[in-house]
Amino acid sequence: VQLQASGGGLVQPGGSLRLSCAAAGFNFRLNTLGWYRQAPGNQREFVGDITSGHSTNYSDSVKGRFTISRDNVKRVMYLAMNDLKPEDTAIYYCKTVYRSRDFWGQGTQVTVSS
């Protein structure tokens, strides 16, 4: 199982970014996929996830600003982030569970600053 997150960068408050998570090594269309983030000095926290049926779930801190989607043909999950705030600054990771094990991507840095 391989997950590779990309698309991070530096953005001003109120700006937007779209992260991608490319996946390989498992039956992508059957798996729930999730986004997590970790800010310096903090524990990794749940951002949101998307099921095989495309149902989504979000943390209260990003609800209404972030949108998760997936392309089962391209085997990619996306995180569209709008109205970004300085407190969204973190390393963002994608995750899936396969055969009862957690698999994580390497993370992509998102920095929100003026």
Image: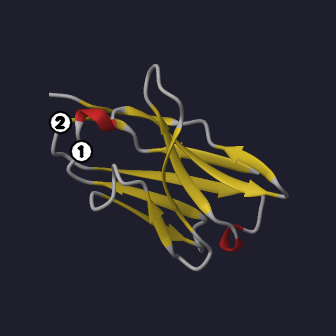
Mark 2: which amino acid? Gln
Q: Quadrant of the C terminus?
A: top left
Residue 23 rendering spot, x and y as whole percentages:
65, 56
Please tell me which residue lies in front, 53 or 21.
53
Mark 1: which amino acid? Leu
Write the residue at 51% across / 45% down.
36
**In the rendered image of this protein, does residue 105 appear above or below residue 34?**
above
Write the residue at 34% across / 35% down.
9
Q: Residues within 10 Å of mark 1 (few under 14, many from 20)?
A: many
Mark whose residue sits in front, 1 or 2: 1
Q: Dots 1 and 2: beta carbons under 8 Å?
A: yes
**In the rendered image of this protein, does residue 2 appear above or below residue 57?**
above
Write the residue at 75% across / 68% down.
27
Tag 1, which secondary structure? loop
Tag 2, which secondary structure? loop
Q: Which residue is mark 2?
A: 12
* Residue at the farthest front position: 60
Q: Which residue is mark 1?
A: 84
**In the rendered image of this protein, does residue 50 appear above or below residue 38?**
below
